[in-house]
């Protein structure tokens, strides 16, 4: 393949994640982007009770029941010559770790803000990760079909709470939170939406015209027209100047107003996003910067998902391609094991619907059939150029429970299920010192993860479990250069629980920082870490 062809494929790729607080409309927007991309002809309304359709991107039964996403799904479609990879991240804060890893695999992010609620807690956390990585952030203010805050107030809030300036690409028409359409600043035209009774299941017809057109002034009403003209003048005079350089460095966010539920402003947002968002970028590695145009293949694993297909009980690892061209059946060097691996069944996704693919390019996300060889953050590269991408940061667990199978006859399935879900990064696994293998101690970042664990063990592995919450909130990995740490050598071990992690490293669980302080003071030779010593804290 020529360098020119590779370059062309790279430049038409856009890989992004959608971040937001739960219920701001993330899954709905994902659906509508797919609708405009022609990937689905009828968008499943997540909330609509009349029809029993569920969102395409939520595939796990528990997500359909609750109307929330608890796994990051991967979706790919084409639009106007572009190849788009969307990573729909979990909105629930208990799954921040999954989201964090997903954000390592994208080149830009779309932040959704609820017009009535503004910037919410979870958005702040996720925004911080994007900011650390310096990736461009595009803002979509959603639910404009409902009563909401004024656009000026929302701009101020984004600036004060997130510390990033906003440049409105379009502006809502209407006053006091009642909106009829949007004004497109680039094209200097008004777009009004027709009434749609289908809850936004079809592509919407809209009327387009000029602000100066008296017919439009009459349609939207004199008061609205006057307010719009004043707002535009104010934005042009006193607002931010558009600066592409600042957008690319994550210092200025292009801001769009719309409603994913009624498709209001979605197509315009998609087109502008594709025009402004960056193609796949170069990445840091142990061997310097890896450019996407480097013809030697490289990729990393950022997500592992067991049992996506209940009929086959398979396990998939998702890789993000960073450089070179991927071809089906190629052999690559697996950095962690030092072995060559053949990539035989590469797949791409529209949630549960998968297709086997023959080739893929930098920016693409490919699912690999995984017999249990891949780990989170593994680097895959060509044998001629061996290196590794940086490790993912780790989240310290904050909640713990003892978990065992109700039926001892099902021990084998129980161990298999727990092990696979740990490899996915859904939970962290510990074993109590001196205890048998009847039960495990599970650590999570949030309590919804326990619910998902219980649900998945029952539905995917056929195991009912007994779960007892433990009174600990702090985990510390321990290291002593001089001697091995054992429960008897640790002073104050009885004030907490002494466990080993999956790699047999000693970890102490305690109920609070005060107890930890006492133990730290009484064991001067031991170093205590909030995450394993070889990892970076997120």
Image (cartoon, rainbow, N blue to C red):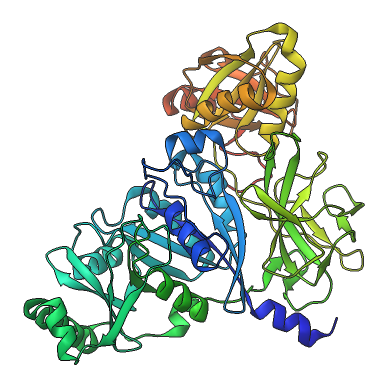
Q: Is residue 337 left or right of residue 146?
A: right
Q: Residue furthest bottom?
A: 212
Residue 251 seen in render = no
Q: Quadrant of residue 508?
A: top right
Residue 268 seen in render = yes
Residue sitting at 70 percent across and 51 percent down?
377
In x, y percent, where is residue 442?
59, 24
In x, y percent, where is residue 364?
68, 65
Residue sitting at 14 percent across and 84 percent down?
217
**In the depicted view, which residue is nearer to us: 438 or 205?**
205
In x, y percent, where is residue 76?
62, 62
**In the depicted view, which residue is nearer to us: 203 or 483?**
203
In x, y percent, where is residue 511?
46, 22
**In the depicted view, which residue is nearer to us: 396 or 247?**
247
Q: Quadrant of residue 430?
A: top right
Residue sitting at 87 percent across and 47 percent down?
337
Q: Quadrant of residue 483?
A: top right
């Amino acid at each position: 393949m020529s360098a020119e062809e590779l370059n062309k494929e790279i430049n038409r790729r856009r890989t992004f994640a959608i971040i937001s607080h739960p219920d701001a409309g993330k899954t709905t927007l994902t659906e509508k982007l797919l609708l405009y991309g022609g990937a689905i002809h009828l968008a499943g309304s997540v909330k609509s009770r009349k029809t029993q359709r569920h969102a395409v991107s939520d595939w796990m039964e528990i997500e359909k029941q609750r109307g929330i996403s608890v796994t990051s799904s991967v979706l790919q479609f084409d639009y106007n010559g572009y190849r788009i990879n969307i990573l729909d991240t979990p909105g629930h804060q208990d799954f921040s770790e999954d989201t964090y890893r997903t954000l390592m695999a994208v080149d830009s992010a779309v932040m959704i803000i609820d017009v009535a609620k503004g910037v919410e807690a979870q958005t702040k956390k996720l925004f911080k990760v994007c900011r650390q990585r310096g990736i461009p952030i595009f803002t979509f203010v959603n639910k404009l079909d409902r009563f909401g805050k004024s656009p000026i107030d929302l701009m101020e809030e984004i600036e004060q709470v997130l510390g990033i300036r906003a440049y409105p690409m379009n502006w809502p028409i209407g006053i006091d939170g009642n909106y009829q359409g949007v004004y497109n600043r680039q094209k200097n035209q008004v777009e009004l939406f027709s009434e749609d009774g289908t809850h936004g299941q079809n592509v919407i017809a809209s009327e387009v015209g000029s602000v100066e057109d008296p017919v439009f002034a009459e349609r939207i009403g004199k008061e609205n027209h006057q307010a719009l003209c004043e707002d535009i003048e104010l934005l042009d005079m006193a607002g931010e100047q558009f600066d592409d350089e600042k957008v690319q460095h994550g210092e200025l966010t292009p801001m769009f107003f719309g409603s994913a539920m009624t498709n209001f402003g979605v197509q315009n947002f998609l087109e502008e996003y594709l025009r402004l968002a960056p193609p796949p970028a170069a990445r840091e590695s142990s061997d310097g910067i890896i450019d996407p145009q480097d013809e030697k293949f490289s990729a990393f694993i950022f997500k592992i998902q067991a049992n996506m297909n209940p009929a086959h009980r398979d396990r998939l690892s998702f890789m993000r391609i960073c450089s070179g061209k991927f071809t089906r059946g190629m052999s690559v060097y697996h950095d962690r094991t030092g072995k060559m691996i053949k990539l035989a069944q590469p797949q791409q996704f529209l949630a549960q619907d998968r297709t086997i693919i023959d080739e893929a390019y930098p920016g693409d996300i490919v699912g690999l059939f995984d017999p249990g060889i891949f780990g989170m953050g593994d680097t895959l590269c060509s044998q001629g150029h061996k290196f590794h991408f940086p490790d993912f940061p780790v989240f310290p667990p904050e909640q713990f429970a003892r978990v065992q199978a109700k039926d001892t006859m099902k021990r084998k399935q129980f161990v298999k299920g727990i092990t696979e879900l740990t490899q996915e990064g859904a939970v962290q696994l510990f074993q109590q010192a001196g205890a048998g293998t009847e039960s495990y101690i599970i650590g999570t970042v949030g309590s919804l993860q326990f619910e998902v664990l219980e649900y998945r063990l029952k539905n995917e592995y056929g195991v009912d479990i007994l779960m007892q919450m433990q009174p600990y909130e702090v985990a510390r990995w321990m290291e002593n250069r001089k001697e091995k740490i054992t429960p008897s050598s640790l002073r104050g071990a009885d004030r907490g629980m002494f466990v080993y992690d999956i790699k047999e490293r000693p970890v102490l669980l305690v109920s609070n920082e005060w107890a930890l302080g006492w133990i730290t003071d009484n064991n001067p030779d031991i170093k205590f870490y909030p995450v394993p010593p070889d990892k970076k804290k997120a």
